[in-house]
Image (spheres, grey):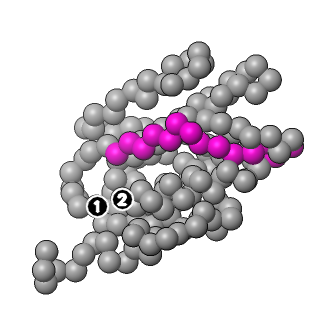
């Protein structure tokens, strides 16, 4: 649109060559105004190849993350979310700290109506660990589909 300011004009990472942040704390989560203010809807991000490091052994840990949120005034810009999630690749933290930390950071940055994250972690030592976080009760007036990540059988 000509003559009107773009809701994307303040973004610094989208459309630019942006390296992976050194840590989750250094990652910049960018947001844009919700283009459908006043409408209740669900946004879902699926990250089936999330990786982090075990803080004790340094061995890689792998998870299938599902992030659902009902936007308030803001949407997360997806490239910045990808870079934020990628910053965990060389970050040592337990499954619980990664999953809950991602959920809390998104909730703090976006102030969504509602947010949940499911961290479906692949087995280490023969035991998969699933970690769930949500910001409060889900709104009754929004369709929130099940995450449908199966119990571990080769996750997919």
The mark that comes first in sequence, 2 or 1, is 1
Region rendered in magenta: 43-56
Q: Quadrant of residue 30?
A: bottom left
Q: Is residue 88 above or below residue 29?
A: above
Report the residue at 62% width, 50% height from top: 101
User: Is mark 2 in CB contact (under 8 Å) with mark 1?
Assistant: yes
Which of the numbered marks, if any, corresponds to residue 111? none
Report the residue at 71% width, 38% height from top: 61
Taken as a whole, is the magenta stretch helix, strand or loop? Answer: strand
Residue farthest toward the left in the current orientation of the protein = 2
- Specify whether residue 39 is painted magenta: no
The foreground one among 25 and 88 is 88
Q: Secondary structure at mark 1?
A: loop
Q: Position of residue 93 (x, y in %)?
A: 75, 47
Q: Secondary structure at mark 2?
A: strand
Q: Where is mark 1, residue-wise?
A: 34
């Amino acid at each position: 649109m000509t003559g009107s300011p773009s809701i994307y004009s303040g973004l610094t990472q989208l459309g630019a060559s942006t390296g992976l942040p050194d840590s989750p704390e250094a990652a910049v989560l960018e947001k844009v105004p919700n283009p459908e203010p006043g409408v209740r809807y669900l946004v879902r991000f699926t990250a089936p190849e999330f990786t982090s490091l075990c803080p004790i052994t340094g061995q890689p840990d792998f998870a299938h993350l599902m992030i659902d949120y009902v936007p308030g005034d803001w949407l997360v810009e997806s490239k910045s979310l990808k870079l934020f999630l990628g910053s965990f690749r060389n970050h040592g933290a337990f499954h619980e700290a990664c999953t809950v930390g991602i959920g809390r950071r998104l909730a703090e940055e976006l102030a969504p109506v509602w947010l949940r994250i499911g961290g479906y972690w692949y087995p280490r030592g023969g035991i998969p660990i699933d970690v769930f976080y949500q910001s409060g009760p889900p709104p009754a007036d929004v369709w929130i589909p099940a995450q449908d990540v199966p119990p571990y059988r080769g996750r997919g």
